[in-house]
Image (cartoon, helix red, strand yellow):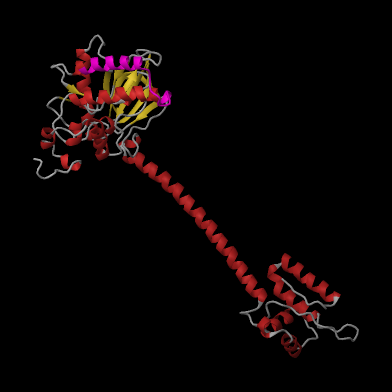
Amino acid sequence: MVLLNSDVAPGATRAMDSVATVQAKRPDAWHKHEQMMLMEKQKPKGGESVRHAVLYGRLVDEEQLAVSLSQAGPGPNTPSDIQAMQARIPQHFRDPATAPLRKLSVDLIKTYKHINEVYYAKKKRRAQQTQGEDSSHKKERKLYNDGYDDDNHDYIIKHGEKFLDRYEIDSLIGKGSFGQVVKAFDHEEQCHVAIKIIKNKKPFLNQAQIEVKLLEMMNKADADNKYYIVKLKRHFMWRNHLCLVFELLSYNLYDLLRNTNFRGVSLNLTRKFAQQLCTALLFLSTPELSIIHCDLKPENILLCNPKRSAIKIVDFGSSCQLGQRIYQYIQSRFYRSPEVLLGIPYNLAIDMWSLGCILVEMHTGEPLFSGANEVDQMNKIVEVLGMPPKHILDQAHKARKYFDKVPGLG
């Protein structure tokens, strides 16, 4: 960068322009040309003295200038001339710490350097993140069931994969805490089925084995398929995952409500659902079964056909037989019975409570008791039905979670 004062001779201007051109073409030769052109300007023209152009920029010390001049060839200037020329430049421009061109150049370099550092740092981070994700996925594939499972111990579903050279995977139907449900084609029976693939974890495997046992009991007792319980076709192990093969059903009652924009279905259709569900619960209560579903809700009641009202109950993963209660946390909150909320012994009646909540919701489109948590759930129940009987509260070890005992009232 070269700055000239306002009254510089035209010849000097052309000379300085040539210096700038040389600097742009050959940055490494800049200092040499700067010195040469500076000396050129000192030559008198026609015996007349010429006002010298003031160079604002980096100054070269005498030793460097002398070396450059000796390399460039002999010239008429002497060290005293050089000193005189330098003396004419203002002190604050000669000081390397305050010279404008130097400061601007240094700051410019720092700016570009900072930009480059930020850019390459971000680029490096992105590369490391991508590499880390790739390596972590590879690591997970190696760690979890030889690469067949993800980090949640769910089987990695692949479209078109065949289980037992018979069930061809079509698509994922849904996921839950237990695992996944996929739609598949049974090449042996030439029909579509639903396969419930249990997580590759011991607790989930144990729970699913109980579900298989209960389903086999129910299917055996319902050989004519008239009690609205889903059919378990078979089960098998596949790469350390227990797989349950069911008949393929349609969408659930919650999907039906959503299709009505939660305005509810007709009272006539609600009655049809009620009749089938009561028949199913009556079947489960028979002495040879005595099965409590423990998670009855619209999502676990499926239509057999989207154009008909026939339904079936699914998902017996939380179920148990009477007297063999296994799980502490049961029933979805909106359909959770007071017995379960209060922590007192429960029986098949808790499914009847859930049924009542479901039927109201199917007709109105909204949950009967939609508590934000267990305390709120109990409050909503009390608002509609009043306080639980005293003998119930006396045996409820979780009663103080919801109620304060008033002194003097027994």
Q: Is residue 402 depicted above or below 219 in this figure?
A: below
Residue 259 painted magenta: yes
Residue 161 image offset from top left, x and y in percent: 39, 25
Give the camera-side residue of 226 and 114: 226
Image quadrant for the C terminus? Answer: top left
Confirm whether the magenta stretch covers residue 3.
no
Main SS, magenta region, reads: helix
Residue bounds of the magenta highlight: 258-281
Which of the pair 8/385 is nearer the observer?
385
> From the image, which quarter does the N terminus lie in?
bottom right
Q: Could you say which is closer to the camera, residue 44 or residue 190?
A: 190
Residue at the right extreme?
Answer: 46
Q: Residue at x 42, y 44 (%)?
A: 134
* Residue 99 location (% of width, % of height): 65, 78
**Residue 306, image x and y in percent?**
40, 16
Q: Residue at x 88, y 82 (%)?
A: 45
